Image (spheres, grey):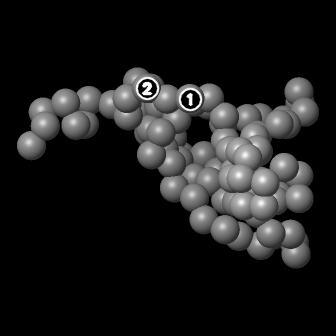
């Protein structure tokens, strides 16, 4: 077993992205307005598709910070907003 495996999530990139399967281009999902909270840089976050108030989107929960701390927050991205 690699002794470094649980030291931290490794190098991370800021942003949440989705692949447009028609254009095969990545689109950034977390383009929020200034007054809205955006997720901090993280790795190993859980996500699933969800429908909230009739809108389909991506629900993202938690993950690991660069410091190896755990997040317990929740973000929802409306697919139509990408």
Q: Residue furthest left?
A: 1
> Which mark, residue 60?
none
* Vertical position of residue 19 compared to residue 65: above or below: below
Q: Residues within 10 Å of mark 1 (few under 14, many from 20)?
A: few
Exactly how many numbered labels are in the figure?
2
Quadrant showing the N terminus: top left
Q: Which residue is mark 2?
A: 11
Q: Nearer the viewer, residue 7 or 16?
A: 16
Residue placed at 26% from the left, 29% from the top?
7
Q: Which residue is mark 1?
A: 13
Query: In x, y percent, where is residue 3?
Result: 12, 33
Residue placed at 83% from the left, 37% from the top?
31
Residue placed at 71% from the left, 53% from the top?
24
Q: Nearer the viewer, residue 21 or 39?
A: 21
Query: In x, y percent, where is residue 33?
Result: 90, 33
Q: Nearer the viewer, residue 23 or 17?
A: 23
Residue placed at 51% from the left, 55% from the top?
46
Q: Secondary structure at mark 1?
A: loop
- Report how far apart the C-alphas of labels 1 and 2 lie in the structure: 7 Å
Q: Residue furthest front?
A: 23
Query: In x, y percent, where is residue 62?
Result: 53, 47
Residue 26 seen in the figure: yes
* Vertical position of residue 37 compared to residue 61: above or below: above
Mark 2 and mark 1 in contact (Cβ < 8 Å)? yes
Place residue 57 in its image quadrant: bottom right
Query: In x, y percent, where is residue 41?
Result: 57, 30
């Amino acid at each position: 077993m690699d002794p470094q495996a649980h030291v931290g999530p490794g190098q991370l990139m800021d942003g949440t992205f989705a692949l447009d399967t028609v254009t095969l281009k990545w689109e950034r999902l977390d383009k929020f307005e200034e007054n809205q909270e955006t997720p901090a840089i993280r790795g190993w976050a859980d996500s699933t598709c969800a429908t909230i108030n009739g809108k389909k989107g991506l629900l993202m929960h938690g993950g690991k910070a660069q410091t190896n701390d755990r997040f317990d927050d929740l973000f929802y991205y409306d697919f139509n907003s990408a």
